[in-house]
Image (cartoon, rainbow, N blue to C red):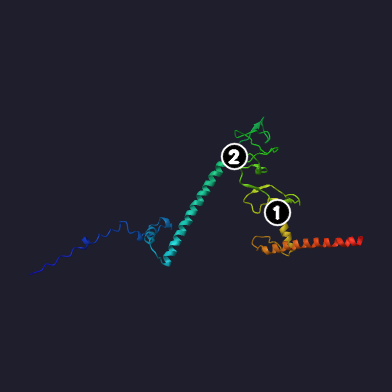
Amino acid sequence: MVLKTPKKEPCSQSSPPIPPPSSTPNSNTQKQSPSGDASSSPVIVGEEECLRTASRLERTEVLRRRSRRLHQLASTYRRHYWSLVEELRIKHRDYYWEYGKSPLEKRKFNGQEASAEEEEVETGEERMKCAFSGCKAKAMALTKFCHQHILADPKQTLYKPCNFVIKSSPHGAPIICGKPILKAANPSLCLAHYQRSQRGISQALKKAGVTMPSSSNKPIPKFSLLISEAVHQIQMKRQSGNNSKSDEPKKEQALG
């Protein structure tokens, strides 16, 4: 009796056909784009999909994932920054288009240019004056007050007064400068009083034997030197006050 052996089926029927070279290859074999953008690479998408549910990762995989996400975050911040720059440029242009004064638009009266006080109309609107009583200066844009009296506006949020003490009285509150400065200014001093405070600091450092650097490349003196000089000046004032008090009974005895 002859047994018949079953014939083997061809490989083409048992396994799926091999795709041609022109078809879409596997995502793991694609190369990254020349620009190096990790967010647009299909290799990154496939790798993230494979490692998304992994409980443990190798050091190289962790470093590669962190580097990729860092590049994605940096590219996102760059796009956001340049979009803000473009938005600022558009708003700056619109602001000057609405509130700016064109040098070509000049009113003339009897063949002569009118002065700034005689011009009551500018670009079709009345010239806005400061709402502060007695002030005739022109008001700033989007407010009714000039720069000198901008602190009188209760709705403004950009300015604060200068905190330099002009006069101090023992019974009342100290009198400060009060000139409007930007809230971002630190310290809270106007330009004149900031320069005055800098001169005072430089004089105190010279008394302590330290010269301020003229250029920004040289190191700045330590803060401890400023503290020691301030403490030294306070001690000198106290010593002079104690000496004056001790001299008073001697003078009374001499007069008696």
Q: Position of residue 130 (x, y in %)?
A: 66, 38
In this rendering, would 57 be left or right of 150?
left
Q: Position of residue 210 (x, y in %)?
A: 71, 64
Quadrant hosting residue 128 = top right
Q: Position of residue 54 (x, y in %)?
A: 38, 63
Callout in the foreground (2, 1): 1
Q: Nearer the viewer, residue 121 or 164?
A: 164
Q: What mark, if any, has residue 195 been given in the picture?
A: 1
Q: What residue sits right under mark 2 in the picture?
A: 99
Amino acid type assigned to the residue bearing label 2 in the image: Tyr
Q: Residue furthest bottom?
A: 1
Q: Quadrant of the N terminus?
A: bottom left
Q: Nearer the viewer, residue 207 or 226?
A: 226
Q: Residues within 10 Å of mark 2 (few under 14, many from 20)?
A: few
In this rendering, would 53 be left or right of 117?
left
Q: Quadrant of the C terminus?
A: bottom right
